[in-house]
């Protein structure tokens, strides 16, 4: 009888932990989405500021491209983190991806 009570208690705690994890996942995703939005907004603002500062369209485009690159990297990071949270990838998978990117850099 005590075993059944212990099992029921453990099942209840497990469900509570799953609910907390789901809430945390939702908050993390929302925060990552907000960061990505701000990165894109910053890229647009940088383009506007660079037009005011630089006379040359090449410089304006280079500045805008750099900020878009940052936003793209943020998007990739968000996607990878989401893959870990949802269980689609492990930290080991991300390490392998990082190593492949480093090999391309060299």
Image (tube, rainbow, N blue to C red):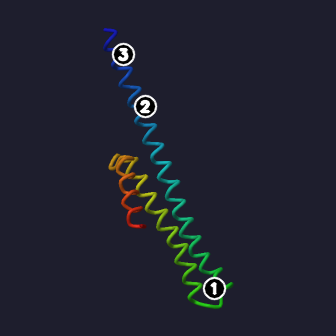
- State the residue position of label 1: 51
Disc 2 marks which residue?
16
Which residue corresponds to mark 3? 6
Q: Residues within 10 Å of mark 3 (few under 14, many from 20)?
A: few
Of 93 and 9, the residue lying toward us: 93
Residue 44, image x, y percentages: 57, 76
Relative to residue 105, is residue 78 depicted above or below? Answer: above
Mark with earlier residue (2, 1): 2
Foreground tag (3 vs 1): 1
Badge 1: how crowded within 10 Å, few (<14), some, or many (20+)? Answer: some
Measure the C-alpha gap from mark 3 to mark 2. 15 Å
**Around disc 2, counting alpha carbons within 10 Å, would you say few (fewer than 14), some (14 to 19), or many (20 or more)?**
few
Q: Identify which residue, 99 or 93, lies in the foreground.
A: 99
Q: Quadrant of the N terminus?
A: top left
Please report contact status of discs 3 and 1: CB closer than 8 Å, yes or no. Answer: no
> In x, y percent, where is residue 39?
55, 66
Residue at x 42% of width, y 67% of height: 105
The residue drawn where x is 50% and y is 56% is 32
Q: Considering the numbered disc 2 on the image, is that residue within a helix, a strand or a loop?
A: helix
SS at mark 1 in the image:
helix
**Residue 63 in the figure: left or right of residue 87:** right
Identify which residue is drawn at 53% across, 69% down: 40
Residue at mark 2 to residue at mark 1: CA–CA distance: 53 Å
């Amino acid at each position: 009888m005590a075993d059944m009570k212990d099992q029921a208690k453990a099942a209840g705690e497990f469900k509570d932990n799953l609910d907390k994890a789901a809430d945390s996942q939702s908050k993390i995703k929302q925060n990552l989405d907000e960061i990505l939005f701000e990165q894109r907004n910053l890229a647009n603002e940088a383009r506007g500021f660079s037009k005011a500062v630089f006379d040359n369209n090449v410089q304006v485009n280079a500045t805008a491209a750099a900020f878009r690159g940052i936003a793209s990297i943020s998007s990739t990071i968000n996607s990878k983190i989401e893959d870990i949270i949802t269980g689609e990838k492990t930290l080991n998978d991300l390490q392998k991806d990082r190593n492949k990117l480093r090999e391309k850099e060299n």
